[in-house]
Image: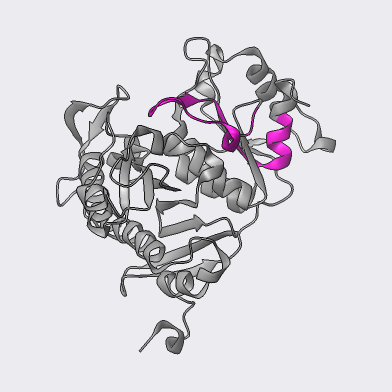
Amino acid sequence: MNSNTQGLPPTLSRFIRSRQSEYPEATGDFTSLLSAIALGGKLISRQINLAGLVEATGYTGRVNVQGEEVAKLDDWSNELFIDLLSETGLVCAIGSEELDRPVFPESGAESGKYVVSYDPVDGSSNIDVAAPIGTIFSIYPRKSPSGECSDADLLQPGRNQVAAGYILYGSSTIFCYTTGQGVHAFTLDQTMGEYHLTTPDLKFPEKSNVYSTNEGNSGTWLMPDRQWVNYVKENDPDTGRPYSARYIGALVADFHRILLKGGIFAYPGNTTNPEGKLRMLYECAPMAFVAEQAGGAATNGTTPILDLTPTGLHQRSPFYIGSKREVDLVGAFHGTT
């Protein structure tokens, strides 16, 4: 018996198949690739729910290429996605926030049409306290000739993405993605092991007075960002100020909230690291694609994220994402309007 006969919304796999004609990558291969990522989300969700029982909390003792402590769940999830993506035979290069170098699966060396980059566990510091975390993924078309996949396949501008999205692990598990034809969110029914469509064609609310940022860093921010945050905290009811602050500490969770409720997420650069903290390939570009498809915007303060071409696998960027009006406001402080 299928989900529709039970009165439930369509499943993720059924939805993707039904809309294949709406995007250029309309092939069964592309559907299989998204399904592999969705399966990874199901398995990570289960691991999180059992975290205390299967020793998935805590740290491995290693430090990754980002200079960050590696959580046990980071390691496990990273290997999971490498295995799942390699098994499809559709991927010629895999880039991960947890890896210094890309993986070039032999299974996709000749026939792999896609390149995938991901952050397996966004918000690792939330794992041990049962707070929301997420997975971020991005899919690009292969650029290199058959058998010659290289770093250059990963270093593409964000506008080349054919799909991107995230999986939120919180009070429920939500798979949210875009292929350039709107943004759609699915909720995992743990009892059936299926994602069901819960919010088609998501759009940012036009108005909101919420900002999400780690304001504890504001003492080292550059002047435009200090001026912006001071402005949104001023008391001016006619312009909806002061704004309310909401910060979870995991990009996926903070972004999902503003996607539904409106507002802006900001992770500026600072005097020590003007390039910021978040990674272009694994965080900024995929979330920017989702944001623009939902009627929002994402910039580094002066330039749309999707117009930037990364020059390094772990290049960082200041990041402002959310409702277009709010991102434009930040741009005004940076002198872009």
In the figure, residue 337 lies in which quadrant? top right
On the image, the x and y values in percent for residue 230 come to 69, 21
Q: Is residue 91 above or below residue 227?
A: below
**Magenta stretch contains residue 317:** yes
Question: Quick one: which residue is furthest to the front in this view?
Answer: 145
In the figure, residue 303 lies in which quadrant? top right
Q: Residue at x 50, y 47 (%)?
A: 161
**Magenta stretch contains residue 168:** no
Q: Residue at x 53, y 40 (%)?
A: 158
Q: Is residue 15 left or right of residue 103?
A: right
Q: Is residue 21 above or below residue 182?
A: below
Q: State whether residue 42 appears in this view.
A: yes
Q: State whether residue 132 appears in this view.
A: no
In this rendered view, identify the residue nearer to me: 265 or 176.
176
Q: Quadrant of the N terminus?
A: bottom left
In this rendered view, identify the residue nearer to me: 262 or 286.
286
Question: Quick one: which residue is furthest to the top in this view?
Answer: 271
Q: Which stretch appears magenta? A: 303-329
Count every numbered label the image shows and give the total.
0
Q: Residue at x 48, y 29 (%)?
A: 310
In this rendered view, identify the residue nearer to me: 219 or 168.
168
On the image, the x and y values in percent for residue 5 come to 44, 89
Q: Residue at x 65, y 55 (%)?
A: 203
On the image, the x and y values in percent for residue 97 come to 33, 34
In the figure, residue 22 lies in which quadrant? bottom right
Q: Is residue 312 above or below residue 34?
A: above
